[in-house]
Image (spheres, rainbow, N blue to C red):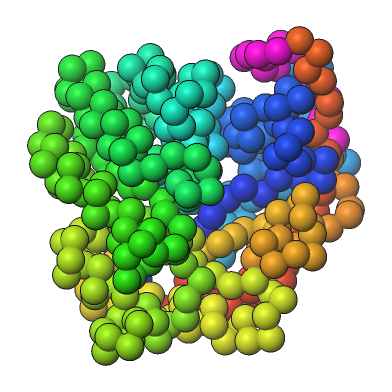
Amino acid sequence: MNKNFNGMCYAPYPHGYDPSTANDTLIFYGSDVAYDCMTPMWGKEYTSKAGSHCDLNGPNKARNDIQTLANMGVTLIRLYDWDPRNNHLKFLDYCNSFNIKVLVSVSCYFVKPGDDNGLKDRDIQIPKLIDSFSNSQKTDYHSAVAGIVIGNEPARNGYNAQHCIDFTTSWADIEASKYPNYREVLIGHPVDFATYGAKYPCFGFWDPLFAVLDKKTTKNLNKRLFLAPQTYNDREYLFQNAEASGKGYVDIAYEKYQKPIIFTEIGNNRLLSNYQEVVDGQLAGSIEYAAKNPNKLLGICFFQFADKVWIPGTTEGSHGTRSQGNDILCTINYVNGDFTHWDKEGIKNVPLTVNALIPTPLNDIVVKNYKKV
């Protein structure tokens, strides 16, 4: 894909995780997979303050997902949730060691109106987020950061285009006033592939969003924006003939908005009879198109690395290049001192039990396309 990104959506929670109960535990609070206490999943070695240890060779084995992703040809990781109070430097440094870049995330709850620590508190929360995306010297965004994704699927998560406008304009203003020397990284707003009232998916959300953000020149925000659609449509729709228009969706979107695309989700679930054919077409078509049009399509993030552990066997839980195995690689115990915060009484300090992941047929399809010379 030349300099374009071969990406992967990364939220590989193990057995025991459920988003409805995550905030009842210290380890899963905030659903943040990239902080230090989650190292047994993504890294090669970890020792908790309780004395629990894992590495690549002992009886307690770290899973080392980042190495696996690098071996698959992944050059970009897209994250979903991120708590700025956690420590993330080790994750970003480890990604850098494999030349993997990261789309760091602003969790939906920072953008939603009415929530504590939500939109109304953005002037407080945005500096904390920027600090957490920064290098150890706090002089710039960490060199692993390729871009920032703000929120995820607005219609499903209780916010709208105006809320994104308010948050993103504040981000640019705070960058300019408090972080003037930071580089101008890409910014996108992941949108589900619904029409939002327009003819084409995402356009009904993008129209009001860019009507305002295209005029925001502070820190060159208007030049940093990218389209972040999330699609399960096939190659023909994306690159040849969307809605019987005779043009592919990517060309139509670029012509209208003059902004590059990163598909922040693209894939298909394994319960469909033709899922391998569809995924192979999506990836091959994207890579071919991006090589010819690198200014229009910056990359793709395959959805996803591992199945959603809390909804096995469902369409939503069957997109992974890995399924959730039952073999236990390691169990890590923690003490409260392993964590930087806890926000409510009675929160449980439970161990992290890291299970093995089993490659699915999607793994071979991703590797074939991502490692193609």
Asked whether the viewer can see residue 148, the reply is no
> Where 84 falls versus 270 (above or below)?
above
Task: Please give the name of the residue rendered at 46% of the width and 67% of the height, measured from the top-left corner.
Answer: 231
Left or right: residue 277 versus residue 63 is left
* Residue 223 screen position, x and y as percent: 15, 47
Confirm whether residue 20 shows in the render. yes
Above or below: residue 348 compared with residue 331: above
Quarter of image, res 23: top right
Q: Position of residue 202 (x, y in %)?
A: 36, 61
| Residue under the image location 70 percent in, 39 percent down | 19
> Residue 207, located in which quarter of the rendered image?
bottom left
340 with respect to 244 (left or right): right
**Residue range highlighted in magenta:** 331-344
In the drawing, does residue 60 fall left or right of residue 292? right
Q: Does the magenta stretch include residue 335?
A: yes
Please identify the quadrant where the C terminus is shown. bottom left
The percent position of residue 110, horizontal first and vertical second, equals: 46, 28
Q: Is the magenta stretch mostly helix, strand or loop?
A: loop
